[in-house]
């Protein structure tokens, strides 16, 4: 048994042994979890993928004369921002669109620019057009404003993501005879391809499946800066079917995270467009897992062959919210480039970048080894399967 405090002392002295989750698989295979637990102090993880439930909140500072944007309208590079806050605080979601975007009126829509792209431009130091209107008050008399801002010009700019780091996810296929345009990418007809979105053995919550070390207050790598886990994410669903080792076989846990947008690196936060679906944000996250005991070492060392994802038909089961799956496949199969579904061999494609996930895990490893990043004890646990939390659905019903 080790403690986070003991590991931090080793980090301060430059003596901590830190490896990536990818490397840990080979270490556990060669030496076993008992020896690995003694030798390894920290395992680093990483993921870089589209995470639609991402956002920023901003404080612009006050103009002269002052304007109360709260309750009015606000556009950043033409993209709608939420103004139901105080005078010069606004909230911008990654999937927000300009009111002029035709959506899927001309199917499939391009969704070429949205909230995620504005966030990327701010991080990269670009000038962003701020346009706002207000109804005017005695203390905030200005009724409209048009100016350019950069990240350096404004007071606060905070990345706050209500749902990131999905713990496992669907493998999307299409059994229909027409092309589908989804948040899982373009799905070819007649099971023409299978898209998945996970970093597999590098994915943070797949390496800590029971939320033993990752909790509220955990310090993380967030888009090239320091960030923190602030709560379990929306749609957190820990009570799903799991493997004998305890790893979820369905979409399960999620994390809400926060960090200073002004410190982030544009390499790890990028706007993106899904044809026929919408705009989003690619987010890079890395989480250190302290190897406190043999069980953690064992779980961090599970190979891709022992981690499974469900294959879901996005032409029928998914849009109609049916629980049916077409099968389960391992991440070893998914990363091989093809899966077997019955008698069919289907090519696979990853929406999550394993190259970037590997890079994030390695950068985090270097930060810890160079004494630039210490671990934190969670102040509270993420709800696990013992919580009984299950995903609720929205039912259409009349008021009683």
Image: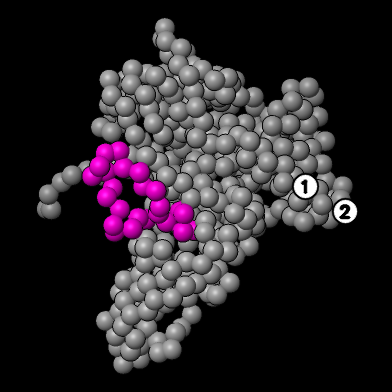
The answer to which quarter of the image holds residue 356 is top right
The answer to which quarter of the image holds residue 184 is top left
Q: Is 95 positioned to the left or the right of 32 in the image?
A: left
Instruction: Describe the element under mark 2 as helix, strand or loop.
Output: loop
Few, some or many residues within 10 Å of mark 2 (<14, 14–19, 20+):
few
Q: How is the image coloured?
A: one colour
For residue 12, above or below residue 390: below
Number of numbered discs: 2
Q: Residue at x 41, y 65 (%)?
A: 76
Instruction: Describe the element under mark 1 as helix, strand or loop.
Output: helix
Q: Position of residue 101 (x, y in %)?
A: 30, 53
For residue 143, above or below residue 233: below
Mark 1–mark 2 Cα distance, whole angstroms, equals 14 Å
Of residues 193 and 139, the one nearer the viewer is: 193
Q: Which residue is mark 1?
A: 366
Q: Residue at x 47, y 75 (%)?
A: 60
Of residues 361 and 323, the one nearer the viewer is: 361
Of residues 181 and 312, the one nearer the viewer is: 181
Q: Residue at x 43, y 30 (%)?
A: 170
Q: Is residue 304 magenta?
A: no
Q: Position of residue 72 (x, y in %)?
A: 30, 74
Magenta residues? 96-119
Q: Which residue is mark 2?
A: 13
For residue 341, the mark is: none
Dominant secondary structure of the residues highlighted in magenta in the image: loop
Q: Is 388 positioned to the left or the right of 287 in the image?
A: left
Few, some or many residues within 10 Å of mark 1 (<14, 14–19, 20+):
some
* Between marks 1 and 2 in the image, the one whose residue lies nearer the viewer: 1
Q: Is 382 positioned to the left or the right of 375 in the image?
A: left
Q: Position of residue 221 (x, y in %)?
A: 64, 51
Q: Residue at x 46, y 54 (%)?
A: 117
């Amino acid at each position: 048994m080790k403690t986070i405090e003991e590991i931090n002392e080793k980090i301060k002295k430059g003596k901590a042994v830190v490896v990536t989750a990818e490397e840990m698989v080979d270490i556990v295979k060669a030496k076993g979890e008992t020896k690995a637990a003694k030798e390894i102090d920290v395992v680093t993880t990483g993921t870089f993928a589209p995470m639609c439930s991402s956002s920023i909140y901003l404080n612009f500072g006050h103009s002269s004369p002052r304007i109360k944007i709260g309750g009015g309208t606000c556009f950043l590079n033409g993209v709608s921002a939420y103004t139901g806050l105080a005078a010069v605080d606004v909230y911008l979601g990654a999937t927000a669109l300009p009111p002029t975007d035709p959506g899927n009126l001309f199917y499939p829509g391009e969704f070429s620019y949205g909230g995620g792209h504005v966030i990327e431009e701010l991080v990269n130091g670009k000038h962003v057009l701020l346009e706002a209107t207000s109804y005017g008050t005695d203390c905030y008399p200005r009724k409209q404003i048009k100016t350019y801002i950069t990240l350096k010009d404004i007071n606060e700019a905070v990345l706050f993501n209500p749902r990131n780091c999905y713990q496992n996810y669907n493998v999307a296929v299409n059994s229909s005879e027409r092309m589908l345009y989804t948040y899982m990418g373009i799905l070819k007809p007649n099971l023409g391809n299978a898209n998945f979105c996970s970093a597999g053995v590098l994915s943070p919550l797949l390496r800590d499946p029971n939320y033993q070390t990752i909790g509220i207050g955990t310090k993380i790598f967030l888009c090239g800066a320091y960030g923190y886990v602030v709560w379990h994410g929306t749609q957190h669903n820990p009570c799903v079917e799991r493997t004998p080792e305890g790893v979820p076989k369905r979409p399960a846990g999620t994390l809400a995270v926060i960090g200073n947008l002004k410190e982030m690196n544009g390499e790890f936060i990028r706007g993106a467009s899904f044809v026929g679906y919408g705009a989003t944000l690619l987010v890079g996250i890395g989480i250190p897992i302290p190897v406190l005991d043999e069980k953690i070492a064992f779980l961090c060392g599970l190979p891709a062959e022992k981690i499974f994802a469900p294959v879901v038909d996005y032409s029928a089961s998914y849009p109609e919210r049916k629980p049916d799956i077409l099968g389960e496949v391992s991440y070893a199969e998914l990363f091989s480039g093809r899966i077997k579904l019955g008698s069919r061999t289907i090519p696979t494609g990853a929406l999550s970048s394993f190259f970037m996930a590997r890079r994030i895990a390695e950068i985090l490893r270097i930060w810890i080894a160079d004494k630039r990043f210490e671990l934190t004890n969670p102040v509270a646990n993420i709800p696990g399967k013992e919580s009984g939390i299950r995903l609720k659905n929205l039912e259409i019903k009349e008021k009683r």
